[in-house]
Amino acid sequence: MKSIRMKIVACMLIAILTSLVIVGGISAWLNYTSTIDTLGQTMTEMADTAAERIEEELNAYKNIAYVTGCIPTLSDRTATVEEKRAVVENQALSHGLQRGNIIGLDGISILDGKDYSDRAYVKSAMKGETAVSEPLVSKITGQLSIMVSAPIWEGGVPGKKVAGVVYFVPNETFLNDIVASLQVSPNGSAYILNNAGYTIAHKNMDNVKNRENTQEDAKTDKKLKDLADLEVRMTLGESGFGRYEYGGSRKFLAFSPIEGTEGWSLAINAPTKDFTQSTVNGIIITIILMVVFLAISSYMAYRLARQIGEPVKDCAQRLRLLAEGDLDTPVHEIHTGDETQILADSARTLVRGFRLMIQDMDEMLAEMSRGNLTADSKCEEAYVGGYRGLLDSARKLSAQLSDTLRQINQSADQVSAGAEQVSAGAQALSQGATEQASAIEELAATINDISGKIIATADRAGDVHSQSSETGREVEQCNEQMLELVNAVRDIGESSSQIGKIIKTIEDIAFQTNILALNAAVEAARAGTAGKGFAVVADEVRNLASKSAEASKSTSVLIEGSARSVEKGMKIADETAASLQKAVISTENTVKAVDKITEATAEQSQAVSQVTQGVDQISSVVQTNSATAEESAAASEELSGQAVILKELVGQFKTR
């Protein structure tokens, strides 16, 4: 647990430290932002100034080339090549240029014979424009060079007619020298980009020769994205200031377009650490001041906390001892003249009051413990304010104990009398329970006998059910066979009808045959002797027809008799089938009745089982009641003895 002194010191130090940190942080932030804003403005102005300088130098070279193109000797067809060479070399020498060259209208140099028609600066000059090329590999020296070209005017009159092209090559490193001189900080640098993002001037010539392009490199190296975004703005001709990070170093970048070129832009960069050192120094000084102020504040806070905390600590320790039961240790004397002295005096008064009350209450309770419930306080004035309730509670306790003991004495008499009555009732209950147990045992035996007979009846009903079911199945099978017999008799009747139709047809055929035989006999008679053989055949045919007719009639009579017999058989079969159907229904009803009897018998058996269980439970309860009654009788006798002992104990107290 922290002491009040430490809490005071901690609160003050936290407040002071928080204030110092906030003030120091704001100061450092304002210093940093002011530095960044000033740097951004300075670097941007420097980039603008450098871009203007490069523009002026390029314009000067353009003017030299333009003036040279207006010299009549270069367009004079009568002038020799040497005269023209002398003019160009004189102009280059007088203006400090590396060299010059003259290109004919066919794109071929008249001085070195090389073809320059593919060069952009030559094409621009052919159109009458003065142009500056990006660093190109010279066809003469093989080095990176910048060419400043202008048209050669016919007769030296500008705008008349282009007669060729003259170009000059300044110092090959003049752009690199300019950007190398631009150093805004010890670790800063500058470079120039063309409108496609390629580096065309840098203090490191390799960047120019290798055609460095950060925008293209950023497609594979994500760390270059911030720088690439700034260079995109450069290629769009914007002027501005930004920050980026690469290689673990944060840098500032200011850029400005170079007017008079085909989208060139100048950039100046510098590491942030070159400009934030003053901010770091300011932060260090602020931290040192914070530590000094914090040390002074800590000392003052400690002294103030000690003046307040020591007296409070002494009082807290004395109150802790009081809580532990120490009523004798004195409270330290404090003479500060403030609230801590009041606190110490109050603690001293509190200890003295507690000591008087505890001693008085101890004497009262000691008397009560010896059986004297008439004891009272000997120092009533010590119970002041809320402590008065303690004395009142002790007095109420004594009075209530006296009343309680008197009531216990009376209750002991009543308990003794009631115990005797309970003992007598328990004995009677025990005897009745014994008689009930005997009767219940007889009832249980009778129910068990009934249960056995019901189970036997259920078994017999099951056998009847099985036999009835079997009889029902056999009657059902007979019914099905009778239906098949009826169907067969009907089929016989239908077959007899068909046979009758066939016999009728045979009779018709015999009748027709007989007529044909008669006609044949008549024709044979007409034929005389020639038809005798035919007449014999006709007689035979007629005889066969007669026999067929007689046989058909006999068969028809038999079929009709058979049909009547079949019809009678069908009638008897239908009646037999109807009787069997009634027998089936009757058998099914018998099976259902037997099923109901079986179910009723099963329910009776279950009910008898439940009754048996209930009787067993009643028997158990009766036995329990009998045992409980015996125990109650014994407990009543014991209770009576305890009541006598209780009266003897109550008699030891002296009540009000």
Image (cartoon, grey):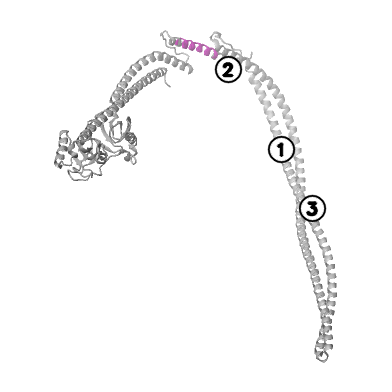
Magenta span includes 43: no
Image position, residue 189 (x, y; %): 25, 32
To which residue does mark 2 refer? 369
Name the mark on residue 621: 1
Residue 593's label in the rendered image is: 3
| Type of the residue with mark 2 | Ser
Q: Residue 223's image quarter? A: top left
Give the spatial CA distance, label 1 vs label 2: 49 Å
Percent coordinates x, y for residue 620 in the rendering:
71, 39
For label 1, count other residues whose C-alpha is less than 10 Å away and answer few (under 14), some (14-19) or many (20+). Answer: some
> The magenta stretch spans which residues?
344-361
Question: Image quadrant for the N terminus?
Answer: top left
CB within 8 Å, label 3 to label 1 = no
Q: Quadrant of residue 380?
A: top right
1 or 2: tag closer to the N-terminus? 2
Q: Is residue 110 left or right of residue 340?
A: left
Mark 3 or mark 2, which is nearer the start of the sequence? 2
Image coords of residue 615 (percent x, y): 74, 41
